[in-house]
Image (spheres, rainbow, N blue to C red):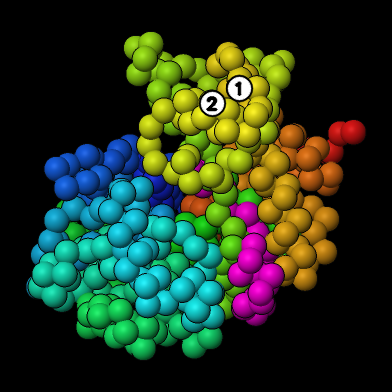
Amino acid sequence: MTGSGAVAAVDLGATSGRVIVGHVGPDTLTTETVARFANDPVPAGDGLHWNLVGMYGSVLSGLRGAFRATPEIASIGVDSWAVDYGLLRRGRLLGEPFHYRDERTGRGVAAVHARFPHAELFERNGLQFLPFNTLYQFAAEDADLLAFADTALLVPDLVGYWLTGIARAEQTNASTTGLMRVLHAAWDDGLISALGLPRGILPPLIAPGDRLGALRADVAASIGAPEATPVTAVGSHDTASAVVAVPMQADAAAYISCGTWGLVGVEVEHLVLSRAALEANFTNEGGVDGRVRLLHNVMGLWVLSEAVRQWERREGHRIDLPTLLDAAREAEGVVFDINDPRFLAPGDMTSRIDAWCDEHDVASPRTRAEYTRSIVESLAQAFADTVAAAGRIGGVDVRTIHIVGGGALNELLCQRTADRAGMPVLAGPVEATALGNVLVQARAAGFVSGSLESLRDLVARTHAPRRYEPRA
């Protein structure tokens, strides 16, 4: 028996965070953003960090506003970006977590691959090579600090711990660490021991939809919530939540969760550990209800947003992105390899584009509009190529591409992706991550029921996407 009700989604992204109240029922799916706050990395003497304690303060403030506006909230769920973690001892955070773009990860890669080449790791964890995956970060960590810690928690698990006092690792995010034996959905004790990492700091696993625990009494009092209010595990990796809310037919579609990163892939029932997947650098990440997200990380809108930040710093005023994209429609652009590692770290993206063009005997863009058009064209080409590879490797007959997240608002990117892929693009919902978070909570609370397909049907009925047909 289902009824309607309200839940609160804490959605933490690499550039901003949100607290969103969702109202859900068999024919209802609406959201209201009650708080939005910046998430800016902090350069310190030892590297680039997140200000996670400050972000948690913003989360509490947002939840306070949520319960003030909607006292009947039945559950709270937390999702965030992957791979980064906090180390604790006796409940105390041992310093602010490192940012995955910090350069320390390079030495971790060397240390791990000296023992386990990527091909061997892929057989165990099913992940594409990304230099910032958690196992590389652990290998680059201060050994004394790791030995002193008694718990390591990924970002959403850490927020959940602060809310409830219960330390668990949610499976979809744990699957991105490189420390899980994917065939067994369990921590890979053999790998962890062989790398000399402390197994004891990794908490028990929990699945999306499971109850993490009730709010701590002091937290409940602080935000004006009933003490019995549960915190529910969701697809705590933001892409896992986003894929829940893609209104797709999984056997005929690819998805692109497009924001800072572009996560491009298909949903399959079983792991794909083939040589083709390894050679194409694809990843098998855990999804809700035991599904597998077979995908590849594309650099995403990070390159454009970082270029815009650089221009704003130089000129001392804000640049209007819609105006910039309008100018880019009329500009010429070149296609460069947007996945080149040079574009990973913060910095001057236009100079890096120039350097790539010089190395490949391609004429560099000249104007700001041309740089913008080049970034969009390069991203659209990477999306089209990755969609084709995902369908081929995953055995999915892709006939439609769904773009969700902030990239769904970029009309030029959506159209050029359709053009370059030669198939329709359906754009939206923009807040797919929050919707997926809300839907998993709502199903656990009994406000809706059924499979992922039924949840996606509710999204399709309440959040009609915008369609872009490919042009000749």
Task: State how far apart marks 2 and 1 are (Cα).
Answer: 5 Å
Label 2 with label 1: CB-CB less than 8 Å: yes
Mark identifier at residue 364? 1
Task: Determine which of the numbered discs, if any, sits on residue 95 in the image.
Answer: none
Image: 38 above or below 250: above
Q: Callout 2: few (<14), some (14-19), or many (20+) C-alpha neighbours within 10 Å?
A: some
The answer to which of marks 2 and 1 sits earlier in the sequence is: 2
What element does badge 2 sit on?
helix
Residue occupying image coordinates x 78% and y 40%: 420
**In the depicted view, which residue is nearer to us: 282 or 171?**
282
Does residue 35 appear anywhere in the picture?
no
Instruction: Name the side, left or right, on which 468 lies relative to 152.
Output: right
Q: Is residue 194 visible?
A: yes
Within 10 Å of disc 1 (Cα), the crowding (few <14, some 14-19, many 20+) is many
Q: Residue at x 72, y 68 (%)?
A: 393
Q: Residue furthest right?
A: 472
Tell me the amino acid under the disc marked 1: Ser
What residue is pinned by disc 2? 354
Q: At which x and y percent is residue 29?
A: 58, 53
Q: Residue at x 66, y 76 (%)?
A: 274
The segment highlighted magenta reads: 259-280
Residue 268, image x, y percentages: 68, 72
| 222 horizontally vs 402: left or right | left
Residue 276 lies within the magenta run:
yes
Residue 142 in the magenta stretch? The answer is no
Which quadrant of the figure has residue 376? top right
Q: Looking at the figure, which quarter contains the C terminus? A: top right
Q: Is residue 178 left or right of residue 142?
A: right
